[in-house]
Amino acid sequence: MATTVIRPIDSKRDRKAFVDLPFRLYADDPNWVPPLKGEALGLITPEKNGWFSHAKAQLFLAERDGRVIGRISAHIDTLALTMPSAQGFGPGVGQWGLFDAEDAATGAELIATAEDWLRGQGMTRALGPISMSIWEEPGLLIEGYDHPPTIMMGHAKPDYRGWIEGAGYEPVKQLMTYEVDVTRNFPPIVQRIIKSGENNPRIVIREVDKTRFEEEAAIILGILNDAWSDNWGFVPLTEPEIKDVGVKLKPIVFNDLIRIAEVDGKPAAFMITLPDLNEPIKPLNGSLFPFGWAKLLWWLRKPKVRTVRVPLMGVVKELQSSRMASQLAFMMIEYIRRASVANYDAKRAEIGWILDDNQGMRSIAETIESRMNKVYQVYGKTL
């Protein structure tokens, strides 16, 4: 019987093999969205990903008879090590992610290899899968395999849950997404809350101005770091990461899909909505050549999508326990709902991810009559 070999990698050729593996493993899965290979390579190349300015990672490939049959990353975020332990990370906590394997035995060996690397780096606990930053694709999909993920969300094989739990991992945190039909009006109670906000001269809900991209991004980042700082898994975004995010997202930033709420003239809340880039990317099968780039550029001129995604929303801490917090949220959601239908032909929106203990956001999602459509699980284990 052929022996499985697991080895650390660092060459361009090996990184390419690392990115290529899922294209074979998920070839028959209609709900897997092939990433653009250039983007996927950028995420695992230190010179191209600002996250590596405060993190280090080791990639591993599993091979049998010279054929790649599995992959995993083991990584340490030095900023995460400084976070309070009560928020999930903290001293001694490393992570692993980008996990794929052909069979259970290979999966178990890969996880054990990642754990050994983390122990060698002085880590005493592992969280996974987190691929690789908490701001990228955290968690393993455990519910919602029957439809494709939206932009910047992950997909996985159902078997992986049993393999990870079989390796001794226990659930730590669930991240949920909710979907809502945006072609219909929200319930009367929501409409009344919105109307009340519109009659309040203290509140202004405005579109962002893409021509002032850096200035608007700084406002949103300021609210985000304040609003999310006590959340489980929070790690502040650094300047190199912010620059990377700007480059990646600027082409799909549209003024009417991103709103900033001001109270008494000061920024108090924001909501970012993105047209689901996965829809035009899926048919490209990972490549922009020979004609994919032209199709994508044409789509970006005036996107028409079935789905829009709300990846981020935040309200400053001083308002979070007030009635105004939900009022601002409902107002932004409604204005973006109207724009997404009128200008992008959207039929549904996906909101999230939302932490399982974020009762405020879960209540907002339920009040607008959305339903949970995907659940992602982060696991933990003492090393």
Image: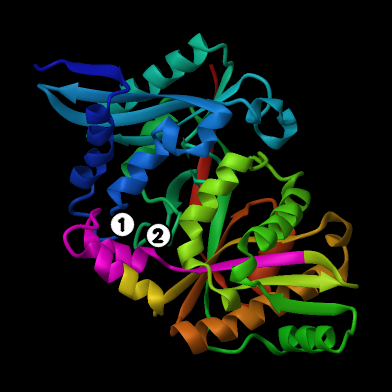
Disc assigned to residue 33: 1
Compared with 5, 177 (above or below) is below
Magenta highlight on residue 380: no
Compared with 11, 366 (above or below) is below
Q: Which residue is drawn at 66% across and 39% down?
A: 235
Q: What stretch is highlighted in magenta?
A: 269-296
Colour scheme of this structure image? Answer: rainbow
| Front position in the image: 115 or 274 | 274
Identity of the residue furthest to the front in this view: 211
Q: Can residue 305 be seen in this view?
A: no
- Element under label 1? loop
| Residue 178 falls in image quadrant | bottom right
Q: Which amino acid does label 2 sit on?
A: Pro
Q: Which residue is drawn at 21% across and 43% down?
A: 25
| Image x and y of residue 236, in percent | 68, 41
Left or right side of 64 for 9: right
Left or right side of 19 for 211: right
Give the mark, 1 or 2, whose residue is nearer the N terminus: 1
| Front position in the image: 97 or 284 | 284
Q: Mark 2 points at which residue?
A: 149
Q: What residue type is labelled 1?
A: Val
Q: Distance between the residues labelled 1 and 2?
A: 7 Å
Q: Which residue is drawn at 48% across and 72% down?
A: 308
Asked whether disc 1 touches disc 2, contact meaning CB atoms under 8 Å apart, the reply is yes
Left or right side of 45 for 94: right
Label 1: few (<14), some (14–19) or many (≥20) C-alpha neighbours in 10 Å: many
Disc assigned to residue 346: none
Compared with 24, 219 (above or below) is below
Please state, as top left, top right, bottom left or bottom right, where the N terminus lies in the image: top left
Q: Is residue 118 visible?
A: yes
| Residue 204 falls in image quadrant | bottom right
